[in-house]
Amino acid sequence: MGKKPPQVHIFSDGSCKPNPGPGGWAAILRCPELNLEKELSGYEPHTTNNRMELTAATRALEALKCPCEVTLTTDSEYLANAFRKGWLKSWKRNGWKTSTREPVKNRDLWEVLDALMARHTVRWNWTRGHVGHPENERCDELANAARERRGN
């Protein structure tokens, strides 16, 4: 039997103000069994809140050096529901069209995220934003700081 993959908890958030406009993203990666934690954040000069949410999750998964069992918590229903409700599978099956036959927005980022998902086992959790979830609040703080540092 092979070694069990590490369990990693990822918390992610994106920020854009105004929307569209300058944006920031952030993620916290936590591996309790190795007692490791890492914070990531970044900036885009012209983007949207949804692109920043996608970027946060993508950058977090890209930072993992080996296949992992991931629990990813986000306050973005757009991001979580794409996996929890099967939207991404439907979009791909429908030639990257939504249920109303419109092109899927942010397809470039969805394709990258989809490819990263193939490497890991990911369970998606949604949390309401701005209600005191410590890691979500920290990600919000980091994403806003990244946006404000570079946006001024």
Image (cartoon, helix red, strand yellow):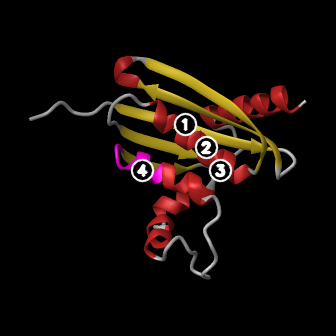
Q: Label 3, label 4: how many angstroms apart (C-alpha)?
A: 27 Å
Marks 2 and 1: in contact by CB < 8 Å?
A: yes
Circles 3, 2 touching at the beta carbon (< 8 Å): no
Quarter occupied by residue 151: top right
Q: Residue furthest bottom?
A: 100
Q: Which residue is disc 2 drawn over?
A: 55
Residue 5 appears at what percent x and percent y? 27, 33
- Residue at numbered disc 3: 128
Q: Amino acid at mark 3?
A: Arg
Q: Amino acid at mark 4?
A: Ala
Q: Hey, what amino acid is under mark 1?
A: Arg
| Residue at the image point whose x is 47% and y is 59% from the top | 83
Name the residue carrying label 4. 115
Which of labels 3 and 1 is toward the front?
A: 1
Q: Nearer the viewer, mark 3 or mark 2?
A: 2
Mark 4 secondary-structure assignment:
helix
Vertical placement of residue 111 versus 66, above or below:
below
Task: Look at the numbered discs 3 and 4 and tell me whether their residues touch, using CB distance below 8 Å.
Answer: no
Dot 3 alpha-carbon crowd within 10 angstroms: few under 14, some 14 to 19, many 20 or more: few
Within 10 Å of the Cα at label 4, are there few (<14), some (14-19), or many (20+) other Cα atoms?
few
Predominant SS along the magenta part: helix
Front-lying residue, 79 or 48: 48
Instruction: Give the residue pinned by disc 1.
Output: 59
